[in-house]
Structure formats: C-alpha cells, structure tokens
Amino acid sequence: MSIAPGPLSFDVPVTPDLPGRIRRAIAKQDSAELTYLNPIIRALAYGDVTVGEIKALNAEQALWLLSERDKQQA
C-alpha cells in the first residue's frame, strides 16, 4: 500500500520565528545580528511592542512596524 503525498501549496506563508531569532542571537552573542535586531530588542525592553505583536513577523516587518509607530508619535 502506498500513500500519495497531498498537494503542495506554496501559497502558505512560513511563519518566521523572530523571538527565537532574537534568543539565538543573544545566546551566541552574534554582534552583527544583535546590532541589526537592536531596535526590536530595545522596543521589547521598553514595552513599545509586545512579543505577541511581532512573533508572526520577520525582522524586516518588525523594524517597519517600529518605524511607522515612531512616525505616528512624531
């Protein structure tokens, strides 16, 4: 008996793991990655954004979100 695989759907977005990426960068002390993620980490630390708000975003989307919020507050 053979089981055929179901249809592949490339339209399903892959959920990025931004909180995991941040944890790995901190654990590995990856200075380049930490420099890139620093605005997100700082926003989390100051409560400007929550993990729930960014967990489904990739880093670029989270940085865009922070940038837009800064523009709205200005």
Image (cartoon, helix red, strand yellow):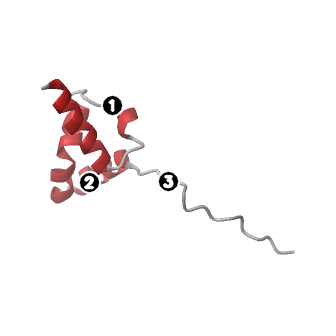
Instruction: Give the mark count.
Output: 3
Q: Residue at x 18, y 42 (%)?
A: 39
Q: Is residue 10 visible?
A: yes
At mark 1, the secondary structure is loop
Tell me if 31 is positioned left or right of 8 in this view.
left
Pointer 2: what residue? 25
Between 47 and 23, the one lying in front of the other is 47
Report which quarter residue 42 is drawn in: top left
| Nearer mark to the viewer, of 2 and 1 | 1
Q: Residue at x 63, y 65 (%)?
A: 8
Between 36 and 66, the one lying in front of the other is 66
As measured in the structure, the alpha-carbon distance from the residue carrying label 2 to the one carrying label 1 is 18 Å
User: Callout 2 environment at 10 Å: few (<14), some (14 to 19), or many (20+)?
Assistant: some
Q: Is residue 14 above or below residue 66?
A: below
The picture places residue 49, in percent across and down from the top left corner, at: 29, 31
As measured in the structure, the alpha-carbon distance from the residue carrying label 1 to the one carrying label 3 is 22 Å
At mark 2, the secondary structure is helix
The picture places residue 36, in percent across and down from the top left corner, at: 18, 52
Q: Amino acid at mark 3?
A: Pro
Query: Can you say which quadrant of the picture contains the N terminus?
Result: bottom right
